[in-house]
Every structure is written in structure tokens, then in C-alpha cells.
Amino acid sequence: MTASPIGRFAPSPTHHLHLGSLTTAVASYCHIKSLGGKWLVRIEDIDFERCKDSYASSILYDLEALGLHWDAEVIYQSARRAIYEDFLHNELANVSYACHCSRKQLDAYRTAHAVQHALNSPVVYPRLCLHRQLDKAHKDSKIRLQLPNVATAFVDGLQGVVWDNPAISLGDVVLKRQNQMINYILACTIDDGLQNISHIMRGLDIMPMTVAQLQLLDMCQLPKPSYFYHLPLLYNPDGQKLSKQNLATPIDTSRPNELLLQALALLGQKINPQLYDASCHEILSFAIEHWDNKPLQHKSSLGVVHT
Ligand code: GLU
């Protein structure tokens, strides 16, 4: 365990907070506080096509209204491009390559190799540009990471031992797109390392990225988080994960204490009847004192909510 545990909540401001992202915020906050740690908020607004400043402000407003106060200045990925570029040019220069394959070309390649996919092999980038030594600065270049072909395991505090070989499950992921956009995997990994995050508690949907992120941290020579906890997700009645993409209803923080209690109940946490008249501060203090990971272990769903 590191001297001072550091957790984080890292929303992408592509929409307002919804009940699903709220449970992640509440869980990561209460869990790290129960360990006596610090909770950071990082706005993952690197995707300039989908993120909006107004959503970032609304997320921060809602967190404050709920009494989820962060312990250091909020960082915005949109202001950190130079840092990510620096890693691409230095630590990652020899493990990344330029790729000019368009989606159309890849589709054609995949159609021609349909037999392989019939065998259920995942559709990963077929490394057509790996040895072409293309210029990374060329206008058609996207930058891919050459992931090592190794299976690695990590222990997830909620899901148990997770094995993965991301060279097979993800393939050579794109770190920087042709339109110059830095992708989530690079920005998030570098920031977790630079912010010395020791405990990552986030949605189960991101778990397939974790081994690749651990490998990327190694390549960037950055410290790795000691603990991962991938939280079960909330679903809508159609069986879809509650998300910004399927337009989950934004939370309404006009009655913040009720909302906190709803999130804690969904997270399977103990709730004392006296809390129904309590302030956010009192509810959070109780939740921190009684925080328990057990109701979240080995589960993929927190249940179904009507949004
Ligand atoms: N930015 C991601 C999201 O909003 C979360 C990333 C993470 O927690 O690693 O879904």
C-alpha cells in the first residue's frame, strides 16, 4: 500500500452525470476516504468532438451539490495535450508506429479474411503498417501502440484475478487519431501515472483496457496503481448499460441527500433509517465509516433502473 492512498473520478464530459456515473463517483469517493486517502477529480475532455465545457461545469456542480468535494485542483485533459505528445515523442517513440489504413481498407481486408473471423478470433488491427516505417507526422498518419503479445494478470479487488493478452483482445490500439486527437487510453494512463493514483475504482465496462493500461504505464516508466476495482454497472430496462450514449436521464441534485441514499442503496451499502433526515455530509460520513466492498464483489450488475 502506498503511503497515502489516492483515488480518482475521471468523467468524460460528453453528457451530464447520470445515476450510473453517480454510483461510480460515490463508490470511489467513499472507498478511498474509508482508507484515509485523497479523492481527485479529472475531467477527461480530450475528445474535442464529443466533450463540452458546459457538461464539465455541470458535473462539477453536481458533485459539489452532493458534498463530494475533491482534494486537489481539478485537472482537464484538454489542457494537457503537450504532455501526451511528449510521451509519444519520447518514451513511446520506439513502441508506436504510424498507420495509414483507412476504415474502408480495413473492412476490405477483413472481408477478404472472413474465414479467420468465422473462427471467432477478435477483430483486431492486422498490423498492415507495422513494418512500413511511415512518417508519424504525415497528414494520413494515426499512431498505434505495438502491444506485446503476452498474457498478464492483475488482481481486481471486486472481480478477482483477471487475465488478458491485449495484443489479442484489443490489438494495436490507436493512441493518436489522424485528426490529431489523443485517445482515451493514452491520456488516462499517463494521467493516472503522473497523478500517482494508487486505487482505481471505475465501471466494469473499462476493465478490458486495464492490462493494456498497465503495459502502457510500464512503457512510459510511470508508477502503476496498486489496486483496481471494477464496479458492477446499472442497466436500463432494455438491458443496455446506463450511459451517456443511450441518453440516461441526468441526475437532479435539488434533493442531494435523497440522491446519495439512492446511490448507496444501489451500491448495496448499509443505510441507517436515521439517514433519511440527514445532510449530505452526515450521509457521506456514515457511508465512509461503513464502506464495504463485499456487496459489489463478483457482480456485473447493480440492477435495472428506469431512466
Ligand atoms: N472517462 C471515462 C468515462 O467517463 C472513465 C475513465 C476511467 O475511469 O478510467 O467513462
Image: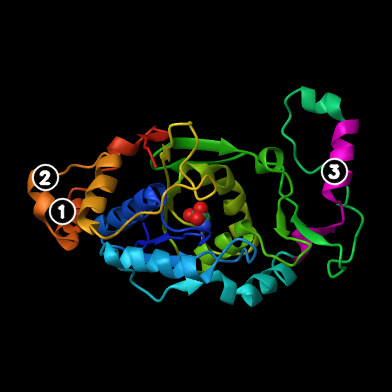
Q: What's the coloring here?
A: rainbow
Measured as percent of width and height from the top left, residue 273 is found at 9, 44
Q: Secondary structure at mark 3?
A: helix
Give the class, few, some or many, for how many residues have Cα within 10 Å of label 1's Cα (few <14, many ≥20).
some
In the rendered image of this protein, does residue 74 appear above or below residue 251? below
> Disc 3 marks which amino acid?
Leu
Instruction: Return the residue at label 3.
Output: 106
Measured as percent of width and height from the top left, residue 151 is found at 63, 39
Q: Is residue 193 left or right of residue 262?
A: right
> Does label 2 or label 1 sit earlier along the sequence?
2
Look at the image and tell me in which quarter the C terminus lies.
top left
Q: Secondary structure at mark 2?
A: loop
> Does label 3 or label 1 sit earlier along the sequence?
3
Question: Answer yes or no: do the residues labelled 2 and 3 have beta carbons within 8 Å?
Answer: no
Question: Answer yes or no: do the residues labelled 2 and 1 have beta carbons within 8 Å?
Answer: yes
Q: Residue furthest left?
A: 274
Rendered image quadrant of residue 218: bottom right
Q: Is residue 10 left or right of residue 69?
A: right
Which residue is at 53% across, 46% downward?
A: 206
Instruction: Return the residue at label 1.
Output: 286
In the rendered image of this protein, does residue 191 appear above or below residue 108? below
Instruction: Return the residue at label 2.
Output: 272
Magenta part of the protein: which range?
Answer: 93-112
Q: Secondary structure at mark 1?
A: helix
> Does label 2 or label 3 sit earlier along the sequence?
3
In the rendered image of this protein, does residue 63 appear above or below residue 114? below
> Disc 2 marks which amino acid?
Asn
> Disc 1 marks which amino acid?
Phe
Look at the image and tell me in which quarter the N terminus lies.
bottom left
User: Looking at mark 3, is its residue's CB closer than 8 Å to ligand 1?
Assistant: no
